Amino acid sequence: MDEEKLFDEWNKNKKLVQLREISKRFYPTGSEVWMCILGKNIGFEQNGGGDNFSRPCLVIKKFNNQMFLIAPLSTKQKKLDFYYNFTDPNSLQVSVILAQIRLLSIKRFKRRMYNISVEDFELIKKRCQKFFS
């Protein structure tokens, strides 16, 4: 599908995301990986995939019940400062893309997938602190 059609599809989908009723069971917290609806984005910003433009994301910080700091995950591991490579609970090699950290509304969260280890989460937070210092 060409870029223009993808943007048109995402715009239709985005309207549905905005109208979604949020389940009272949604309680994302730091260190959890959730499938989130990221959309079709601009330039090199990380996109979601599939029919609903979603991808796994790590919750880095919960600000309140509506807003969360997240980083998207990728199945491509790279030896770069802004990638944190780890093995998920299903033994898949994945990366947290720290350069793509962003604020996300609870309306974009679809389902909880798993928790990363305490050790990995602490290392990710330390790596994030380096970016912001």
Image: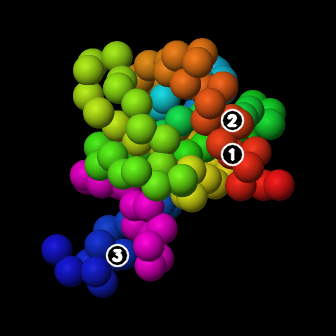
Which amino acid, mark 2? Lys
17 relative to 6, above or below: above
Q: Nearer the viewer, mark 3 or mark 2?
A: 2
Asked whether the residues under the numbered discs 1 and 2 touch, taking CB atoms below 8 Å apart as contact, a structural biologist would say: yes
Tell me, for residue 128, which label it has, or none.
1
Image: magenta residue range: 36-55
Q: CA distance from mark 1 to mark 3?
A: 34 Å
Tell me, for residue 97, which label it has, or none.
none
Q: Is residue 16 left or right of residue 66?
A: left
Q: Residue 10 location, x and y as percent?
A: 38, 66
Which amino acid, mark 1? Cys
- Asked if the magenta segment contains residue 43, the reply would be yes
Say which residue label 3 marks.
8
Q: Is residue 55 left or right of residue 66?
A: left
**Helix, strand or loop under label 2:** helix
Residue ID at (44%, 61%): 46
Q: How many marks?
A: 3
**Helix, strand or loop under label 3:** helix
